[in-house]
Amino acid sequence: MFLAWKEFRYEKRNKPDVIRFEFNLEDNLFELHDQLKNKIYQHSDYSTFNICDPKLRKINKAIVADRVLHHAVFRILYPIFDSNFIFDSYSCRTEKGTHRAVKRLEKFCRKLSQNNHKIIYVLKCDIRKFFDSIDQNILLEIIKAKIQD
């Protein structure tokens, strides 16, 4: 759980909720561990707010303890699911990310345009409310097929 905490707090250590959690870090991590061990853990409600980056987005934010647990679960599930993703999926993947995605796109553009000697077209698009539209039952079936616990 401590490694999950270290990953979680990276670039968040000055946030008030993170500071409060860290003030009693050992107690908070042990409490989370005990709740999981005794099978009494319950995820807290999300706080919801909007941001503009540049378009309006609805953000659902979990409390610190839940987000630390998200990181712990991610550490276990990532190797199981990562091998199923296409190579050119870059979001939230180890050693990928936005900068590498842009470099890969530039490489494709150079190749297809023959070093800017040929006109090419690129479509940038987003699927509106994609994550809200995911069928939770189908998602759970996919997860159950990979994980027996």
Image (cartoon, helix red, strand yellow):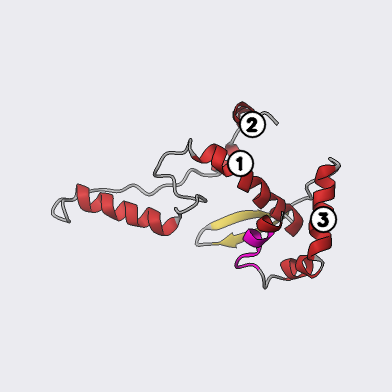
Residue bearing the label numbered 1? 77
Residue 86 to residue 3: above or below? above
Q: Are marks 3 and 1 in contact (CB under 8 Å)?
A: no
Magenta stretch, overall SS: helix
Q: Which mark is residue 90?
A: none
Residue 87 to residue 62: above or below? above
Outermost residue on the bottom side: it is 14
Residue drawn 60% across the image and 30% down it:
146
Residue bearing the label numbered 3? 30
- Estimate how packed mark 1 is, as few (under 14), some (14 to 19) or many (20 or more) residues with alpha carbons within 10 Å: some
First in sequence: mark 2 vs mark 1:
1
Residue 10 on the magenta segment: yes
Q: CA distance from mark 3 to mark 2?
A: 26 Å
Q: Secondary structure at mark 2?
A: loop
Q: Secondary structure at mark 3?
A: helix
Q: Is residue 91 left or right of residue 21?
A: left
Q: Is residue 85 left or right of residue 3?
A: left
First in sequence: mark 3 vs mark 1:
3
Residue type indicated by callout 1: Leu
Q: Position of residue 81 (x, y in %)?
A: 54, 38
Residue bearing the label numbered 2? 147
Give the magenta-colored segment's residue range.
5-12
Q: Are marks 2 and 1 in contact (CB under 8 Å)?
A: yes
First in sequence: mark 3 vs mark 2:
3
Q: Are marks 3 and 2 in contact (CB under 8 Å)?
A: no
